[in-house]
Image (cartoon, rainbow, N blue to C red):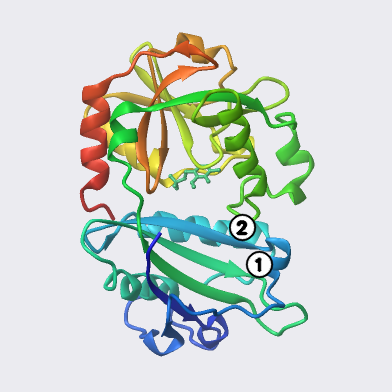
Amino acid sequence: MTWRHALVIDPVAADDRPADGPGADFTDTFTPIDPQAPALSVGELSTQRGDGIFESIGVVDGHPQEVGAHLDRLIHSARLCDLPVPHREQWRQAVVAAATEAPEGESVMKLILSRGVEHGPAPTAWITVASAPDFRTVRRDGVRVATLDRGLDSGAPERAPWLLLGAKTLSYAVNMAAIREAKRRGADDALFVSSDGVLLEGPTSSLILRIDGRYVTPAPGAGILHGTTQMSVFEELARRGFETAYATLPASALSQADAAWLVSSVRLAVPVTAIDGSPMPVDGELTRSINEYLLSPRD
Ligand code: PLP
């Protein structure tokens, strides 16, 4: 990965600025830093405990995609984690500033808000921009998926909110372990299922199934992230006249589907070609046109 740009945001500087809308200028509250140089204190709670939240935004030819939806989720994650709520307009302006430094083609922009340095006075916030990996092949050829028990039942998000299941926290070690386990099982990616058999999400993506001509995705209340890409795909499918729905989907829904995708902000829509070794049909034409849509400028 080539790091192209980084900037540090001073969240405290926005506190005394009442205007949270167009008109206020926040450019003096963020500072570009050398993306190749060390920047974090050794006392950072993001690195010591994974105690923070993040967003990954796709940037296409300098245009950051779906910024509003990503900021909504960053704010939602902050609330769930008892972090100071990000100042929307400050972050929006920082995203716009960082995007001007993105190269042609596809990049990934990360927004990170950490609880800060241990015993320190303030959270730490920064944005990075890096070139995205080349996902063209996987978007066309798809992924084999292994279903994995998340080890929690579908009542866990409500019963144990401290598990932060709907927040996009920095603690992704479990998600990465799930992908390694899927690979050990001969697949390319994982799909989490609750211990009582409800379909959830991939470790870095949302699931969309097509069943009887209707596009369905697990409801975000199930302790999963509400995917910005899934929302955008549903908007586009609805514009094309297709029916879309959120649902509680049992694992048996997988065998009723005649197409399935894992969708996320940077890899975009990848067709699922097999689940636990059983082949899944691929709608190549729809996948191509959805990715074309996802690569067009979206706000
Ligand atoms: N679910 C999880 C656990 C994720 O990590 C991600 C993205 O990284 C998604 C879903 C998809 O979200 P988005 O489409 O906003 O990238």
Label 2 crowd (10 A; few <14 / some 14-19 / many >=20): some
The yes-or-no answer for disc 2 within 8 Å of ligand 1 is: no
Q: Residue at x 59, y 57 (%)?
A: 77
Residue hosting label 2: 170
Q: Marks 1 and 2, how far apart in space?
A: 7 Å
Label 1 crowd (10 A; few <14 / some 14-19 / many >=20): many
List x then y, in percent, for residue 132: 35, 54
**Circles 1 and 2: CB atoms closer than 8 Å:** yes
Residue hosting label 1: 46
Q: Residue at x 50, y 25 (%)?
A: 145
Q: Nearer the viewer, residue 78 or 169?
A: 169
Does residue 127 sit above or below 199 in this rendering?
below
Marks 1 and 2, the one that precedes in the sequence? 1
List x then y, in percent, for residue 287: 27, 29
Q: Quadrant of the N terminus?
A: bottom left
Q: Residue at x 23, y 56 (%)?
A: 105
Answer with the quarter of the image where residue 29 lies: bottom left
* Residue kind at label 1, given as amino acid type: Ser
Q: Nearer the viewer, residue 283 or 177?
A: 177
In the drawing, what numbered circle is on residue 129?
Answer: none
Left or right relative to 70: residue 239? left
The yes-or-no answer for disc 1 within 8 Å of ligand 1 is: no
Q: Nearer the viewer, residue 126 or 298?
A: 126
